Image (cartoon, helix red, strand yellow):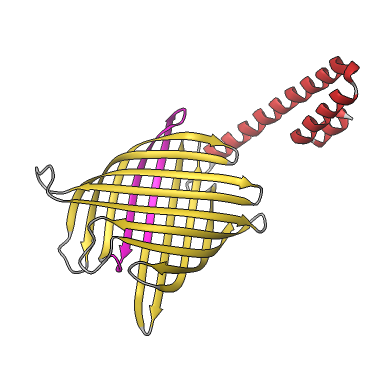
Amino acid sequence: MIAAAIETGDDAKVKTVVELARTTYPDDTAEIDALQQKWSEMLALRDAEASRIREAEIREAGFFDLWSGEGELGGFHSAGNTDSVGASASLALKREGLAWSHRLRLRGDYQRQNGTTSREQVLAAYEPRWEFADDWFAYGLAQYERDTIQGFKGRYAISGGLGYTAIDREGLSLSVKAGPAYRVTDYIDQPSESRLAALAGLDFDWQVFERLSLNQSANAVAETGGQALVIVDSSNTTLNLVTGLDFKVTDSLRSRLSYQVDYDSNPPVGAVSADTLTRFTLVYGF
């Protein structure tokens, strides 16, 4: 019975059969232990070979190889500065190496109502990471935003710092990062501003059960006012928080309900501090 389970190569099945055999045949413990040890050795050899092959593939791959990601398309309802519906699209790509990883995010929300564009929100971000120790990594971040509702036609941020992976196991992951940043904001009705800033970020993914998962990402930037030797001239804190609930339809297709909050502690005249989006989208993974 155990030998037949071993031939399938399924570790979960082998564990189940072994437990059943221990209960059914308590006098054959030594033989069961021997078969379980044999399977453990076979599994270790298989995992080691798989790791060797994977490492060789990574070392030989070019920069444009080994990318995975997801595309998202759907609609949204907004409340805050506007009360409207519109279209939303995004693309998220990720490449995992031996020590380096790369993340690219593109997102756009657009609405045209009565011949007038009432929402044109764009985000593009690229983040390389270098894992230099167990659970610790250094990151870089280049980000561009455009949000006419919040009063700026372009906001550019560059940051670098350290991050820590607090949890990384099957079905659950949590990482945090923080570092200095430099941000340039191109306002629509005001002069451009350049500021030093501090950035903090959080990424959280949780597979609640087989077909349902919760994902959350947050990035907060706290600016100190002043462009010269000023300690506190003015302050501006922005927060981007996205929480999503995914339901798996097929291996590649998911439906997603997400909620986004964009907070600006010192918005331009005529805008409010908090802007929210509720999206319902279809997500295709590849």
Location of residue 16 by image quarter = top right
Q: For the point 21% across and 64% down, which residue is it? A: 268
Q: For the point 54% across and 56% down, which residue is it? A: 70
Q: Point out the stretch of residues depicted in magenta.
A: 123-150
Q: Nearer the viewer, residue 51 or 133?
A: 133
Image quadrant containing the N terminus: top right
- Pick out the residue farthest to the bottom: 114
Q: Is residue 115 magenta?
A: no
Could you say where residue 66 lies in the image, as x and y percent from the top left?
54, 47
Q: Nearer the viewer, residue 75 or 39?
A: 75
Report whether 266 appears left or right of 96. Answer: left
Report whether 219 appears left or right of 51. Answer: left
Q: For the point 40% across and 49% down, which residue is it? A: 218
Report whether 27 appears left or right of 93. Answer: right
Q: From where the camera sits, is residue 64 visible? A: no
Q: For the point 85% across and 17% down, which residue is it? A: 29
Location of residue 191 by image quarter = bottom left
Could you say where residue 174 lies in the image, as x and y percent from the top left?
48, 39
Q: Is residue 241 above or below residue 172?
A: below
Q: Is residue 99 above or below residue 72?
A: above
Q: From where the camera sits, is residue 117 visible? A: yes
Q: Is residue 147 magenta?
A: yes
Report whether 176 appears left or right of 36. Answer: left
